[in-house]
Image (spheres, helix red, strand yellow):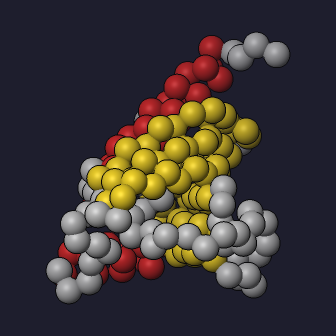
């Protein structure tokens, strides 16, 4: 079924939001990335598959909004750091879809391939991103982001960057 002009405009706005988020992550602009989150935001990177209740099963990351802010504040102290030198990153985002538009909130999905260059060598990370985006003026805030790494059931390299 063809998209309406309004659906096309929403898809374009969502795509630009996701591209901006990817750029901020690639450039380690953590304060600007943090500003993309809603006050009740949840950031989830499951382990051992894509399903399950993150309250009951192991996760790579399962952070509420205050934990997201704490991670970034700790990074800024200089006493806690993820890695030195920082990975050089580039994300390729594709297959952006608005799965459900409820007016104030949208369920959105896309695929991402992350190229990481670090002293241990180059690593490729492939994942499915599922977002719950909340309209905020002429943009969005992330109410939820789930990052399902394709090989999350395997032993993973140390992930010292935001996915």
Residue reaching furthest to the front: 121
Left or right, 153 with respect to 144, comes to right
Of residues 138 and 21, the one drawn nearer to the viewer in this rendering:
21
Q: Is residue 128 above or below residue 75?
A: above
Q: Residue at x 69, y 15 (%)?
A: 4
Q: Residue at x 56, y 70 (%)?
A: 156
Of residues 85 and 64, the one drawn nearer to the viewer in this rendering:
85
Residue reaching furthest to the right: 1
Image location of residue 57, percent across then percent down: 73, 81
Of residues 121 and 47, the one drawn nearer to the viewer in this rendering:
121
Q: In this view, does 70 lie above or below 99?
A: below
Image location of residue 39, percent across then percent down: 47, 67
Q: In which quarter of the image is the N terminus?
A: top right
Q: In this view, does 149 lie above or below 54?
A: above
Q: Which residue is drawn at 32% across and 60% down?
A: 118
Q: In this view, does 54 lie above or below 132?
A: below
Residue 137: which quarter of the image? top left
Left or right, 61 with respect to 17, comes to right
Left or right, 136 with respect to 108, comes to left
Left or right, 39 with respect to 28, comes to right
Q: Is residue 140 visible?
A: no
Q: Which residue is drawn at 68% across and 81% down?
A: 58
Q: How many marks?
A: 0
Of residues 71 and 124, the one drawn nearer to the viewer in this rendering:
124
Q: Can residue 11 be seen in this view?
A: yes
Image location of residue 26, percent across then percent down: 34, 50
Image location of residue 23, percent across then percent down: 35, 44
Residue 76: which quarter of the image? bottom left
């Amino acid at each position: 079924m063809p998209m309406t002009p309004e659906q096309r405009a929403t898809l374009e706005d969502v795509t630009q939001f996701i591209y901006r988020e990817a750029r901020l992550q690639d450039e380690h602009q953590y304060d600007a990335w943090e500003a993309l989150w809603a006050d009740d935001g949840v950031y989830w990177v499951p382990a051992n598959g894509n399903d399950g209740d993150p309250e009951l099963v192991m996760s790579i990351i399962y952070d509420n909004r205050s934990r997201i802010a704490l991670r970034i504040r700790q990074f800024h102290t200089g006493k806690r750091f993820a890695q030195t030198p920082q990975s050089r990153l580039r994300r390729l985002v594709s297959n952006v879809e608005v799965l459900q538009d409820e007016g104030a909130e949208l369920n959105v999905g896309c695929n991402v391939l992350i190229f990481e260059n670090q002293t241990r060598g180059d690593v490729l990370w492939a994942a499915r991103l599922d977002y719950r985006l909340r309209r905020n003026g002429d943009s969005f805030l992330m109410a939820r982001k789930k990052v399902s790494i394709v090989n999350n059931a395997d032993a993973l390299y140390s992930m010292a960057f935001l996915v």
